Image (cartoon, grey):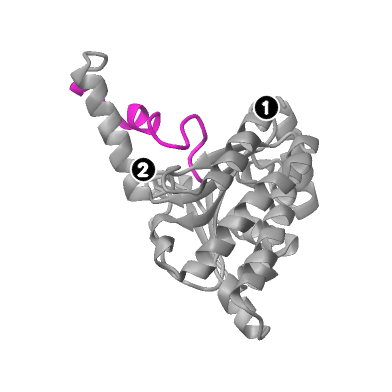
């Protein structure tokens, strides 16, 4: 898909929502929170919440693609989540393997490219196989990039990037004075992607939870009390509408303020 194709989709979205095309975010990141609480409210075991949440991912990813979003990064499993009960982790890993296999037809049909965001160790072999195969199958797709943050930790990502730059300096491939924000960003898991425009967190929690700390430096935050399994396309549209109303100055002042 060409940049013009993304722009055409964003124009259609802008017309539907009555906003400017420039107000449609290029990169959306989502902290998907509330699967367990959703299951508890339904008086169901926690794994039902994870199953419903996985279906929501597919719905929202499709809607983002239709809206002309270039990158969608979803926070699925953090490195800290290994502390959860073993039976829940075992179910989640089984769910990831099945999910990664099951979404392949949809990814190919919609020209979506999957990228893994995070470390592979200690993910189980069945998850790694499903992940590697899906990434390879979609690597030539030219539509929306879907970043799956699985076994992810932003502080670890930043440390890994710093280590990579240090190794390049020791190897004589880079001088320390050449290191700048752009060079650093090129070592991150999201290298080549635009920085996050809109960060959405469901379930009403007011924290970042060690997610994309570098990439969200100028992102707009949108927090909703809706639990992730109940998050709908209409809710995503509301988040985009809220984003469109923000004044993004990137450290500058508005044109009106410059006149005074």
Work out whether 177 lies above or below 207.
Answer: above
Please give the residue where the numbered disc 2 appears in the rendered image: 157
- Give me the residue at 75% from left, 53% from top: 18
Contact between marks 1 and 2 (CB within 8 A): the answer is no
- Residue 14 in view of the camera: no
Q: Nearer the viewer, mark 1 or mark 2?
A: 2
* First in sequence: mark 1 vs mark 2: 1
**Magenta stretch mostly in which secondary structure?**
loop
- Residue 223: x, y in percent? 53, 67
Q: Give the image quarter of residue 252.
A: top left
- Give me the residue at 48% from left, 48% from top: 123
**What is the total number of numbered labels drawn onto the structure image?**
2
**Residue at the limit of the structure toward the top, as seen here:** 172
Part of the protein shown in magenta: 176-196
User: Secondary structure beneath disc 1?
Assistant: helix
231 or 131: nearer the viewer:
131
- Give me the residue at 52% from left, 73% from top: 204
- Residue 104 in view of the camera: yes
Does residue 150 appear left or right of residue 184 in this picture? right
Q: Give the image quarter of residue 139.
A: top right
- Residue 225: x, y in percent? 58, 75
């Amino acid at each position: 898909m060409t940049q013009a194709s993304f722009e055409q989709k964003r124009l259609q979205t802008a017309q539907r929502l009555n906003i400017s095309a420039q107000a449609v975010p290029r990169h959306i990141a989502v902290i998907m929170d509330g699967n367990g609480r959703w299951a508890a409210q339904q008086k169901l075991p926690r794994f039902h919440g994870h199953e419903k949440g996985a279906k929501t991912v597919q719905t929202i990813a499709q809607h983002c693609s239709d809206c002309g979003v270039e990158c969608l990064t979803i926070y699925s499993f953090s490195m800290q989540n290994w502390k959860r009960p073993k039976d829940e982790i075992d179910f989640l890993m089984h769910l990831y393997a099945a999910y990664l296999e099951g979404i392949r037809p949809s990814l190919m049909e919609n020209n979506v490219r999957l990228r893994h965001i995070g470390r592979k160790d200690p993910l189980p072999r069945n998850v790694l196989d499903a992940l590697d195969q899906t990434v390879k199958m979609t690597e030539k797709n030219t539509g929306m990039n879907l970043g799956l943050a699985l076994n992810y930790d932003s502080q670890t990502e930043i440390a890994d990037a710093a280590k990579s730059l240090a190794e390049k300096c020791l190897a004589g491939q880079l001088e320390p004075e050449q290191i700048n924000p752009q060079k650093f960003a090129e070592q991150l898991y999201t290298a080549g992607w635009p920085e996050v425009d809109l960060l959405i967190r469901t379930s009403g929690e007011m924290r970042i939870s060690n997610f994309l700390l570098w990439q969200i430096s100028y992102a707009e935050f949108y927090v909703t009390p809706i639990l992730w399994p109940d998050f709908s396309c209409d809710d995503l549209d509301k988040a985009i509408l809220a984003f469109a109303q923000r004044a993004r100055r990137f450290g500058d002042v508005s044109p009106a303020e410059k006149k005074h």
